[in-house]
Image: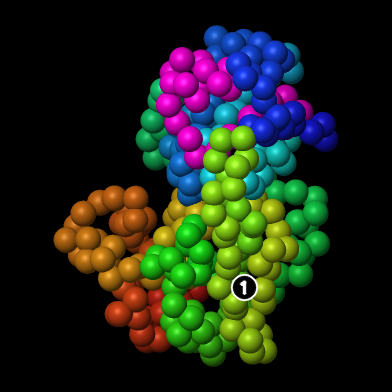
Amino acid sequence: MTEATLILGKDNPPGGRHDFVQAARAAFNKGIYFEFAGGLGDLVNQLVLTDALTKLENLRSTDRAVIVLLCQNPDAPDLFLYHRLAGQFTILSLGACVGDSYRRRHGLPPAPPVPPHVESPPPFRPRFSKSDEAALAMLPEKFVAFSVTAAGGRLENRSIPSRIYTAAARCCLDLGLAPVFLGKRYAHGILDEQRPFFPHDESDPPNFAGVVSLIDHMSVSGSLECVRRAAATVVCNSAIMNASWRMRRPTFYVATDHDWAAYERREKNGYTYGLAYPENTGCSHAGYTDEKLSAFLGRAQTT
């Protein structure tokens, strides 16, 4: 498979690389220029809720799509690099910056396109790399995927405390389900020109028999494929949470007390929308019990 053309912000000269600017202009005129902005979970949502995936899947052999990523996660290009038509993609990976001067600096169109919203989108299916296949082949037959660390790292309040995810892992094992921990450490997020933003660490999985750690062993898309194959997921507010909801996997969301209170007030937002799906449930940090998780996992295995 031919590889995509990947340009990092630090390698894009003022005004934009000539070949990129030409490709962006042509793609914009054809309706195959895309911009995705925010955290990794935001990118997953934008992929699913717009017509981008359909357009990328239906490129003609002479088309060249341009994908601009305004995301602090340095691995965001993984969402596109393993597509079967990746050889027809030019990807510009920028950092978490916005503004007119920033757009001019990188040769972007004056304003991003506004893609149409997709009603009732199909479940998201990731495209993973060949290097992920060995790890995927070793997954237990029945497992629960865990994502316990939020974007700000293990000390961020949205991350699941170790006392909860340790108890949850034991609960899974008692029910014959292997807990598989997902995540990836990176030295720093990226701002414009790949300047360091903040490091991202991961919480350490419980150290007892039966726990599987795939942290740092898979691409972003490989981790999302693990989610797709899982019997269920246990998640904090993370990209994996959004992907699990969008793939319609049974999801147990362990929310901060603040976010769970918002849900109980029926405030629909980016932290609670998936709880409207019948296969999902959750609790606050303070409200977690093994009994709640066991009941959820019992339902998940019968659906």
Q: Is residue 299 visible?
A: no
Which residue lies at the image location 60% right of the left edge and 53% below the top edge? 188
Which residue lies at the image location 41% right of the left edge and 79% below the top edge? 293
Q: Residue 174's x, y, as percent?
A: 54, 90
Which residue lies at the image location 67% right of the left edge and 89% below the top edge? 209
Q: Is residue 156 visible?
A: yes
Residue 276 to residue 196: above or below: below
- Picture quadrant where residue 94 is located: top right
Residue 258 to residue 43: above or below: below
- Picture quadrant where residue 262 is located: bottom left
Q: Which residue is mark 1?
A: 180
Span colored in magenta? 85-111
Which residue lies at the image location 59% right of the left edge and 48% below the top edge? 196
Residue 68 to residue 39: above or below: above
Kind of residue indicated by mark 1: Val
Asked if residue 13 lies in the magenta stretch, the reply is: no
